[in-house]
Amino acid sequence: MSFSPSIFLNLLIAGIFLGGIYSLVSIGLTLIFGTLKLVNFAHGALMMVSMYLTFWLWALLGIDPLISLPISFGLFFSIGYALQKILIMPIIQRPVSAQMLMTLGLLLVIQNAVIMLWSATPRQVVTDFANLIFRYGELYINFPRFAAFVVAMTLSGILHLFLTRTDLGTAIRATAQDSETAKVLGIDVNKVYALSFGLGTACAAVAGNLISTFYPIDPFVGDTFLLMAFIAIVLGSMGNYIGAFIAGLILGVVEIFTAFVLSSLLRQAVPLIIFLLLLLLKPEGLFGGRLRE
């Protein structure tokens, strides 16, 4: 299929905007995996709860999603911190299967609790700028998606600076590389674990907050983003948050072009095929450990 320059550019921008959300979710998930060596199946469910929080703050109190961002970040950082202390810490030395079952159980509990409380009826935040589109010649910019992308990139940049330029960030990276050596050096790895889980959860919550203005909210919406986040962290190399960031952007572009060229029903099929091929041909990911620092 041939593309005019304007169609190609619009698709590329839409893919990058979507990829920015995938990047933010993936960074949170890979931060948890890289530090705790834990596969958190509840990551998407916590993102979904953040979407519902954003919806109810808007529906009941009239708080704009962009205004409620600090609320989502702070609240879900605290929730993630508490979950790690209460549920994850007691099994952190247990076999991987026990850890996976714990987070999978947490996923099912959250989803079923949401269904009991609010049913499975889709909801959506409809703000004054929900349908706002800027046009520059043949280029169309959807404002909610643009705003979500800008905030996601800003938070990703701040997180990168935190991990690379602060003592606490250095402690997180040291623990991710070798927790036993980090203990010998005097790092409180249990505190680092809780902080990493809190930050990862907060990233997912902010992503949920951002997409609530243009994505339907239901108890299973987090599953799609969790799947794409898993693909991104494998594509970007497990535990490599910069690789996950780049991979998230790539997946967003691939998904949008797939939907346009093939079918919207297959938009996630091509990323899945890439994921399977990568596991077969290059299981260490595209970037290995080179971008971890």
Image (tube, rainbow, N blue to C red):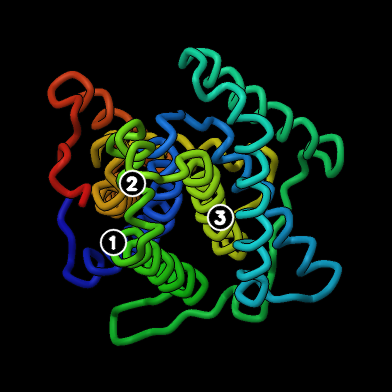
**Labels 2, 1: front one:** 1
Of circles 3 and 1, the one toward us is 1
Can you name the residue that lies furthest to the bottom here?
136
Q: CA distance from mark 3 to mark 2?
A: 25 Å
Q: Is residue 190 above or below residue 156?
A: above
Q: CA distance from mark 2 to mark 1?
A: 31 Å
Binning the other alpha carbons within 10 Å of mark 2 as few (below 14), some (14 to 19) or many (20 upward) gives many
Q: How many marks?
A: 3
Observer-nearest of 58 and 293: 293
Amino acid type, residue under disc 3 in the picture: Ala
Residue 35 percent coordinates (x, y)? 39, 39
Q: Label 1 neighbourhood size at 10 Å, few (<14), some (14-19), many (20+)?
A: some
- For disc 1, the marked residue is 164
Please report whichever mark, 3 or 1, sits nearer to the chain's N-terminal start.
1
Q: Earlier in the sequence, mark 3 or mark 2?
A: 3
Res. 86 in view = yes
Query: Which kind of residue does numbered mark 1 sit on?
Result: Thr
Residue in view at x 55 percent, y 36 percent? 223
Above-or-below relation of 125 to 122:
below
Q: Return the x and y of residue 197 as percentages of the image width and height.
A: 52, 44
Q: Are the residues tagged 3 and 2 within 8 Å (C-beta)?
A: no
Name the kind of residue labelled 2 in the image: Glu
Query: Dot 2 lies on which element?
Result: helix
How far apart are the two marked residues, 3 and 1, measured between alpha carbons?
19 Å
Q: Pointer 3: what residue?
A: 202
**Residue shown at 18%/18% (left/top)?**
280
Q: Residues within 10 Å of mark 3 (few under 14, many from 20)?
A: many
Residue with the mark numbered 2: 255
Q: Is residue 293 above or below residue 263?
A: below
In the rendered image, the vertical position of residue 67 relative to residue 110, given as above or below: below
Find numbered disc 1 in the image and state the secondary structure of the residue it sits on.
Answer: helix
Name the residue at 32% across, 50% down: 248
